[in-house]
């Protein structure tokens, strides 16, 4: 009757030697060679430490209903009309202020509690003799991210467009994209940029200078920009008709980069280290068994009790 | 009861029953006698209504007249009734009395309605503190206390300040006597207010069966003021929630807040308590005519206005500025200068002007220099450059408005360009020791108009900014070469009239020993003109058309962490070109344009090497983490300074925890230690 191996288990064999013997030195050397080289291999082959990571989130964006409009009229002396939701600004600009009608509606298309797009419409009343050639428009938003760090900022969408022919309507359709110069933190509250884009309570003209508003805004490490490189101008305005600006801004899903936390960094390093370590452990285990079995270093081999018992029996 | 009517029910068979009202005579103190069926002597202000019901009648006695005696402007806190009357209602059938009802009327003045409402659900105490705070800060802003600890409305039913609100038992304006009137009808209180129900853990609360035996040891000895309900209903918002919506613009008026004088970014006010305004640039270059001037904010704005719509600003010498509250006013000292160089300021569209006697004056430049000391303005000097123009002049007028704030003792001398090192972007300071002319900078050409050398303006060389600029020189075909070279050389040299440049940004102009460096000139040696070129018209070799100014700069150290750059030397050199007259098909007698150029270069010492590294050098530079993705300093990346995900101490703590866990595992797993333990155990 043929016999089959139905079960097996490893038998343990100990090797004894002094702490200052060659065998001990060999073991220390092998242990060092087992554990340190995998670290060096993993590290030197790039990408060992996770330095930044990304995640996806749709921001919670709300239109703050703050609007600043400058419309340039067709004249050599640079006549303009302006309107804003800031009373002091309107007070400053005196005769150039033209009260406009504004309508804004935010829409949550997928009913997830986060707004997905903004419909904004502005009607600037014009005299029949006035013709608009260029428009600058600032809309401000409050922008929140919650999945990793609680990031809150006040941002803006800046529309600047001009057309050689007097226009009747301007259509802007774009995305409010996040621009990061620096990754965010992985947790905590971040309100660095939760400051107004335009100081609407200021009574000084220099605070409404678009140059300084833009300079202060783009100094930030995290901003939003409106991505619409091609606003559409419609021509053919009726004599009494107002100049109409239609803006549709979508709040898309964003890929946000962040600095990973300590445990995330360690976790990814550990995965890489251990996978390389396994190979080294296996190789050096073989080497150790060979060395001790063949008495390359002098030790006293001792059988475990079970084997001793078996030997006695035999 | 807090109404001026009272209702009673007459039960039983009320058919043919007449109900009558009789007024008692209070003055005599006699109760009205029930005189059923008899005519009464009037019911005064009282009226009687009988409404029949199925089982009887409802009798209502109502006060018809007004409560004029109860509304007194002077007697707010009357504890005495203003109306005391006795009424008798009697019911009779066929002159036989069936029932009497004696009504004692006491009406107390409800002082609440005699005053203006100044706040809803706001306690008097709160208002008093608000007033105090206003007085202290002089601001309009009301400081709202933290509502977690101090509820805004501790007594919600207290609607009127300084008056007892009826049925409001926590109103502190109500005296005990007044409270007696409505003690049984108090409004039930709201938690978080002054109505503090005794809470369960209070030792003084009566012990119920449900509490444990340990209650006497664990209960809380506390006053009722320290209730656990304090702030329990507070939702965490002190300021009202901001809803995103269009806000109706509210116009604010200028108010005087100069209790403490001016400070930075506060508007400067005139004696009329209005903003002091100077035209300033706003938006995208447009000028705002009535823009307030902020304290300590300098500006220099150029405003273009159409002359047809030009309006004269108010006379500055009549303006008086507020210095500080209650002190004398600042009178501007105005200096007028007339200018005739109009072409720089007026762009004319070539209108033909009829000569006439009518002229008008326009301001071309207005320079305002404020002197300040602490929170006050000490002086205002105004320099106005004006010009006379034709009354019908058309075109665009460019006006300049400049405001400078200087400390009261500052001299309007030459500004420093850094202290002590140069600041980038500030003018390089220069000095001419030989000439008495006030030379303070080395200049570059600033192109104007068509860019001809004859109409060039200059702008100073700025520290650290390499520059190149030039102009066009009109040269005729029969130009003498020697003359051309000398002319070009002179023109270029006129840019550098200085003999010395300042080593530091704050070198003293009066002291030549204070770091002034001589400018080194490397003059080109003009070749002796040989006969070869003498004869040819239209060609000149070795014309020094390009001037190069080299500045050697170096970092002389750091001051408070800011690097201080100094100039180590300045050198002016020329390079020559051969000028040749360019003709078309025919050489016309029209001058050619010959470009002259000047360039400025700042060379940092030691010069930054830009030699590319060899691959050997790159592989050696393993410690350089800025140029290597893998560098040895980042071997333990989370503990290195390059890691930005968390704070260092947090990483260190977590790393130590990891080390501890691994040590523990190794300690337990190590066969030697295990054996030692076994041996140790086997000994015993």
Image: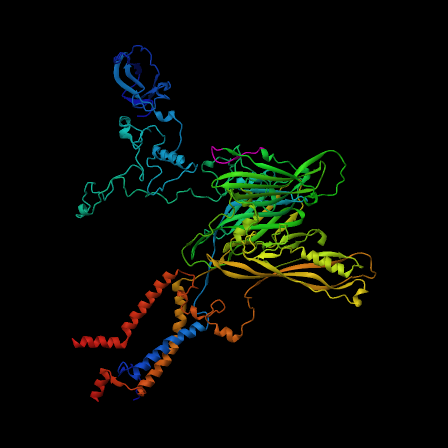
Left or right of A83 in this view: B448: right
Residue A295 vertical position relative to residue A185 in the rendered view, above or below: below
Considering the image in quadrants, where does the N terminus of chain A appear?
A: bottom left
Along the viewing direction, whichever of B615 and A57 lies nearer the viewer:
B615
Please tell me in which quadrant of the rendered image residue A35 appears.
bottom left
B650 and B490: which is toward the camera: B490
Q: Residue at x 33, y 35 (%)?
A: B155
**Mainly helix, strand or loop, the magenta region?**
loop
Instruction: Work out whether B248 lies above or below B520.
Output: above
Most distant residue in the left direction: B684
Would you place residue B181 above or below residue B146 in this image? above
Query: Which one is in front, B50 or B616?
Result: B616
* Place of residue A275 in the rendered image (x, y in percent of width and height, measured from the top left): 40, 73
Report x, y in % for residue A292: 31, 85
Visible residue check, residue B366 = yes
Residue depicted at x 56% and y 68%: B610
Q: Nearer the viewer, residue A80 or B91?
A: A80
Question: Does B34 appear above or below B448?
Answer: above
Residue B482 part of the magenta-drawn span:
no
- Can residue B121 be seen here? The reply is no
Total marks in image: 0
Residue B321 belongs to the span the image colors magenta? yes
Q: Quadrant of the C terminus of chain A?
A: bottom left
Region rendered in magenta: B318-327
Figure coloring:
rainbow
Q: Classify residue B57 by image quadrant.
A: top left
Q: Position of residue B644 (x, y in %)?
A: 43, 61
Q: Residue furthest right?
A: B586
Q: Position of residue A303 (x, y in %)?
A: 24, 84
Q: Residue at x 51, y 37 (%)?
A: B250
């Amino acid at each position: 009757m043929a016999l089959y191996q139905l079960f097996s288990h490893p038998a343990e064999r100990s090797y004894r030697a002094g702490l200052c013997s060659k065998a001990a030195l060999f073991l220390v050397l092998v242990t060092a060679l087992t554990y340190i080289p995998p670290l060096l291999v993993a590290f030197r082959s790039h990408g060992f430490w996770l330095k930044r990571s990304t995640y996806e989130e749709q921001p919670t964006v709300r239109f703050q209903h703050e609007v600043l409009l400058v419309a340039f009229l067709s004249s050599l002396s640079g006549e303009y009309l302006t309107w804003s939701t800031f009373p002091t600004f309107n007070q400053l600009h005196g005769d150039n202020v033209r009260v406009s009608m504004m309508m804004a509606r935010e829409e949550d298309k997928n009913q997830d509690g986060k707004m997905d797009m903004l419909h904004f419409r502005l009607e600037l009343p014009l005299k029949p003799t006035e013709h608009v050639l260029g428009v600058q428009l600032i809309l401000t938003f409050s922008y929140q991210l919650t999945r990793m760090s609680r990031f809150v900022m006040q941002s803006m969408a800046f529309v600047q467009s001009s057309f050689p022919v007097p226009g009747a309507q301007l259509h802007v359709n774009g995305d409010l994209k996040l621009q990061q110069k620096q990754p965010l933190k992985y947790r905590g509250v971040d309100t660095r940029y939760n400051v107004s884009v335009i100081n609407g309570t200021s009574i000084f003209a220099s605070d409404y200078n678009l140059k300084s508003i833009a300079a202060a805004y783009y100094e930030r490490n995290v901003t939003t920009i409106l991505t619409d490189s091609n606003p559409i101008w419609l021509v053919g305005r009726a004599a009494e008709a107002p100049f109409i600006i239609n803006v549709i801004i979508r709040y898309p899903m964003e890929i946000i980069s962040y600095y990973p936390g300590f445990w995330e960094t360690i976790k990814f390093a550990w995965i890489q280290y251990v996978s390389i370590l396994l190979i080294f452990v296996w190789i050096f285990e073989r080497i150790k068994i060979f060395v001790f079995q063949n008495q390359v270093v002098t030790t006293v081999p001792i059988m475990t009790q079970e084997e001793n018992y078996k030997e006695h029996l035999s | 009861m807090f109404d001026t009517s009272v209702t009673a029910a007459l039960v039983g068979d009320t058919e043919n029953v007449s109900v009558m009202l009789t007024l008692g005579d209070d003055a005599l103190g006699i109760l009205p006698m029930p005189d059923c069926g008899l005519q009464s002597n009037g019911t005064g202000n009282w009226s009687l209504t009988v409404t029949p019901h199925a089982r009887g009648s409802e009798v209502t006695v109502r006060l018809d007249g007004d409560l004029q005696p109860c509304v007194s402007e002077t007697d707010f806190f009357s504890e005495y009734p203003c109306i005391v009357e006795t009424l008798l209602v009697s019911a009779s059938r066929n002159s036989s009395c069936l029932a009497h009802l004696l009504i004692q009327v006491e009406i107390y003045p409800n002082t609440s309605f005699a005053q203006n409402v100044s706040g809803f659900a706001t306690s008097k105490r709160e208002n008093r503190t608000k007033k105090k705070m206003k007085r202290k800060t002089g601001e309009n802003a009301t400081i709202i206390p933290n509502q977690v600890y101090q509820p805004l409305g501790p007594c919600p039913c207290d609607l009127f300040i300084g008056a007892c609100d009826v049925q409001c038992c926590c109103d502190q304006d109500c005296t005990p006597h007044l409270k007696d009137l409505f003690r049984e009808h108090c409004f039930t209180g709201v938690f978080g207010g002054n109505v503090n129900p005794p809470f369960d853990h209070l030792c003084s609360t009566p012990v119920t069966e449900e509490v444990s035996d340990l209650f006497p040891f664990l209960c809380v000895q506390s006053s009722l003021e320290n209730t656990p309900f304090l702030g329990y209903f507070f939702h965490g918002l002190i300021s009202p929630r901001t809803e995103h919506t269009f806000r109706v613009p509210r116009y604010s008026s200028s108010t005087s807040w100069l209790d403490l004088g001016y400070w930075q970014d506060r508007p400067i006010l005139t004696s009329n308590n209005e903003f002091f305004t100077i035209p300033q640039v706003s938006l995208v270059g447009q000028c705002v005519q009535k823009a307030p001037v902020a304290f300590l904010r300098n500006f220099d704005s150029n405003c273009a206005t159409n002359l047809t719509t030009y309006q004269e600003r108010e006379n500055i010498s009549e303006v008086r500025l507020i210095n500080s509250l209650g002190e004398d006013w600042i009178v501007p000292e105005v200096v007028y200068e007339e200018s005739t160089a109009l072409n720089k300021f007026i762009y004319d569209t070539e209108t033909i002007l009829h000569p006439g006697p009518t002229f008008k004056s326009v301001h071309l430049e207005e320079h305002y220099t404020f002197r300040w000391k602490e929170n006050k303005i000490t002086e205002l000097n105004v320099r106005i450059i004006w010009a006379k123009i034709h009354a019908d002049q058309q075109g665009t007028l460019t006006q300049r408005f400049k405001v400078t704030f200087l400390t009261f003792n500052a001299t309007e001398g030459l500004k420093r360009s850094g202290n002590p090192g140069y600041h980038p972007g500030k003018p390089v300071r220069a000095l001419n020791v030989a000439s008495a002319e006030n030379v303070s900078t080395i200049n570059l050409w600033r192109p104007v108009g068509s860019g001809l050398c004859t109409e060039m303006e200059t702008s100073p060389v700025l520290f650290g900014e390499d520059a190149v600029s030039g102009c066009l020189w009109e040269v005729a075909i029969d130009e003498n070469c020697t003359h051309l070279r000398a002319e070009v050389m002179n023109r270029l040299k006129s840019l550098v009239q200085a003999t010395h440049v300042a080593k530091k940004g704050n070198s003293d102009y009066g002291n030549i020993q204070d770091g002034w460096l001589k400018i080194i000139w490397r003059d080109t040696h003009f070749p002796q003109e040989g006969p070869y070129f003498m004869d040819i018209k239209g060609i000149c070799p070795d014309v020094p058309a390009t001037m190069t100014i080299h500045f050697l700069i170096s970092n002389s150290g750091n001051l408070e962490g800011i690097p201080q750059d100094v100039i180590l030397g300045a050198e002016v050199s020329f390079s020559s070109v051969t000028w040749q007259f360019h003709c078309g098909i025919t050489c016309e007698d029209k001058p050619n344009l010959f470009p002259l150029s000047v360039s400025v270069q700042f060379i940092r010492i030691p010069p930054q090497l830009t030699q590319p590294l060899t691959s050997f050098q790159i592989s050696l530079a393993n410690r350089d983490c800025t140029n290597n993705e893998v560098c040895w300093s980042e071997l333990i990346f989370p503990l290195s300074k390059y890691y930005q995900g968390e704070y260092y101490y947090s990483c260190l703590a977590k790393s130590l925890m990891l080390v501890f866990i691994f040590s523990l595992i190794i300690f337990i797993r190590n066969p030697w230690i295990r054996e030692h333990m076994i041996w140790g155990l086997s000994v015993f």
